[in-house]
Image: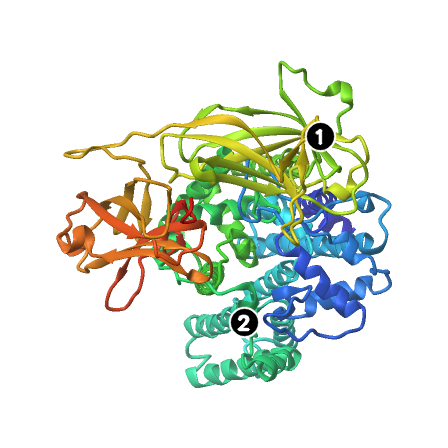
Amino acid sequence: MAFRSSAGAHRGIILILVLYLLLGTLYSVVNPLFEASDEMWHYPFIVHLADGHGLPAQQPGVDQPWRQEGSQPPLYYALGALATFWVDTSDMAQVLWKNPHADIGIPKPDRNVNMVVHTDAERFPYRGTVLAAHIVRWLSVCLGAVTVLCTYLVALDIFPQRRPLALGAAAFVAFNPMFLFVSGSINNDNLANALAALTLWRLVRLVPRPATAERGLAPQHELLLLGGLLGLAALSKASALGLFALAGLALVFIAFWRWRRAPDAHPLPRLLRQLLWSVLVVYGVAILIAGWWFVRNWRLYGDPLGLNTFVAIVGPRHPVPTLRQLWGERVGFTMSFWGFFGGMNVPMSSWLYRTLDLLAALGAMGVAIFLLASWRWLALEARLKLLLMAAWPAIVFVSLIRWTLMTIATQGRLMFAALPAIAFWLVLGWMTWASRRLERWAVLAASLSFFAIGLAAPFIYIRPAYARPPVLAPEQLPSAAEITYVNATFGGHMELVGYTYTPTEAHPGEAISLTVYWRALGRMQQNYSVFVHLLTENDLIVGQRDMYPGQGTYPTTLWRAGDIVADTYVVPISPATLTPATAQFEVGLYLLESGARLQATNSAGQALGDQVRFGEIRIMPRTRSEPGLGDIPNPVFFNLDNRIALIGYVLDRTAAAPGETFHLTLYWRALARTTHDYSVFTQVLGENQQIWAQKDAWPQNGNAPTSTWQPGQVIEDRYELVVQQDAPAGVYDLQVGMYLGATGERLNLLGEGGHVQDDRILLGKVRILRLAE
């Protein structure tokens, strides 16, 4: 009877857990293997352990299959190895077939999002590497269930009489699309999140601990359990080390609570002794469990966390952004909190992000209202618990900021270690807007909404992103009135049947959509990549797309003779393109490893070279007027550290021979006052940073130093770049920027949102001709 009564009281969380397990399994199956953040690096670490090779030694500069993930604490990978050691994974290299052209971290309208090429080997029934990878994914789903359950328990412990709050927080975690996506993937975050949630729950339960005869602030078994959780968390992910600070804070809170409740019964010296003993027990157990890992890192890498090697492999962030620039990355941060799938390249609908962000803002405002109205009436133990719930997200966020300053990692999913606390606060804030009589219905509506989003996301966003274009029958080819037929063949392997594109007129910064119809002439033994160039005068590329056929999903070795595929490429036009201009497409096939192109012939067997050219696109100028200057030619907007922007330019020619001159006019706008006098660099740059033409000077040859510019002022600035006599013929970058003459430090180019993109402005390409030309 007691069991039935308990189950009845908690039937809400049982239902949430069941629905979560179904959704988590759904995500693990619908999302193709290795199409989650760093999953293709996490899994080889597991295989390395499962094959009995022990912990890997990281070697920056050496191509290791686990890359930077070999620097991660090993517990999650050891669990994965324990679950799959019996599976034959000798086919891993075939299953983990990487797409070298994948647009990782950059959503594109023509997809090419798949980091891995997927074949029928991934279909059910699973076997080999596919089976082992799914087992580890299912393990991750189960770990996510621990996080969901602990979210419910911690909220119920803080406000036992507000069960809708606990259920709502658990539902928020369980049905968050990004949490489901991560939980259905191979990622050590899942173990770290589960252990963090368990630790948070145990800490919240400890805070109102009454006095005991124990030497510490809590019974010995509680301290040992807490130390064990901390040790295991330290072996799951470095970011979990913040739990040590949270545990110390909780122990201080327990001592403070006792002293405030009965200072005479708990003299300060005794409390300090108990606090010290508790700290020694908790941290001592944690060190006994995890200390060996940090000693190993110190001996191997000279860093107990091994972060120096991790960063050396993944790449340090340069230049280091300011906090203001990090704030500019908030959009991607919130997107990856709600649901940004694949390799950060499969987004949800923009309206959905805006709606969820608005709901989060309402929740935050509701929390503020709740605290202002209720804080003084809350019992001391409730206040201390709430402080713990606020401290944990703050600790995680500060550590994430520090990590983001070291390497690019502005992802909201990295806050999931604190997701139970975040869910608690947001649901509490939403409930504040509803009356006590309606709050359970408000929580139910929010939970059902999140469930609907979580259920729909795999089918609306994830599955379509990886769908292979259908193979067409010859009779399904469009008529000559719908496409232009070319019938050019490449190396006797592929035929470019025809094409269509739209629009025929565009501006810099816009894109042209080209659909090419390919036909396989036979089975192919090599994987050829497609290149699509948009060429202007002097054969300069102003737009380009490179990918495997089928928008990255259908490498040529998978094609059968006679297969016909309509392949769409969305080619962006460089925003700095000189206008007006007339452009044409250049299309061909090449081997990525060598760069060798297939030779093309027309239907009559005549040689066309290593590409086919067609089409005509008019690239028209944009217009932008400035007072006193009129229309700014070739308007652009390149932001240099929010101080100065390049807003337009003129180039008199796009090709020159050695000894000839490029005449370049730049239009600058002051965005803010500056006390520094920056020099402008203008360069024609070749391989190995070789400069073939250059002119550096203060603006207007020193007559308009930047320290005199007023915000909003526009400066017309002229330069002459003389091509060196020994410059070889070829295509080179034309780049400009600003720097401090005293230090050489350049102003950073900021992208949309304020994140650092580069320390130069690439205006495009120019051609250096042979003297005889």
Q: Residues within 10 Å of mark 2 (few under 14, many from 20)?
A: some
Q: Residue furthest front?
A: 772
Q: Secondary structure at mark 1?
A: loop
Q: Observer-nearest residue: 140 or 710?
A: 710
Residue on which disc 1 sits: 605
Q: Observer-nearest residue: 677 or 7?
A: 677
Q: Residues within 10 Å of mark 1 (few under 14, many from 20)?
A: few
**The C terminus - image quarter:** top left
- Residue 6, percent from left and from top: 72, 51
Q: Amino acid at mark 1?
A: Gly
Q: Tell me what residue is drawn at x 76 percent, y 55 percent.
A: 133
Q: Observer-nearest residue: 500 or 657?
A: 657
Regarding residue 482, the answer to whether it shows in the image is yes
Residue 40: image tag:
none
Residue 449 left/right relative to 697? right
Q: Amino acid at mark 2?
A: Leu
Q: Tell me what residue is drawn at x 65 percent, y 15 percent.
A: 480
Residue 372 left/right relative to 591? left
- Residue 10, percent from left and from top: 68, 48
Residue on which disc 2 sits: 307
Q: Tell me what residue is drawn at x 53 percent, y 48 percent.
A: 337
Q: Observer-nearest residue: 697 or 438?
A: 697
Asked which quadrant contains residue 647, the reply is top left
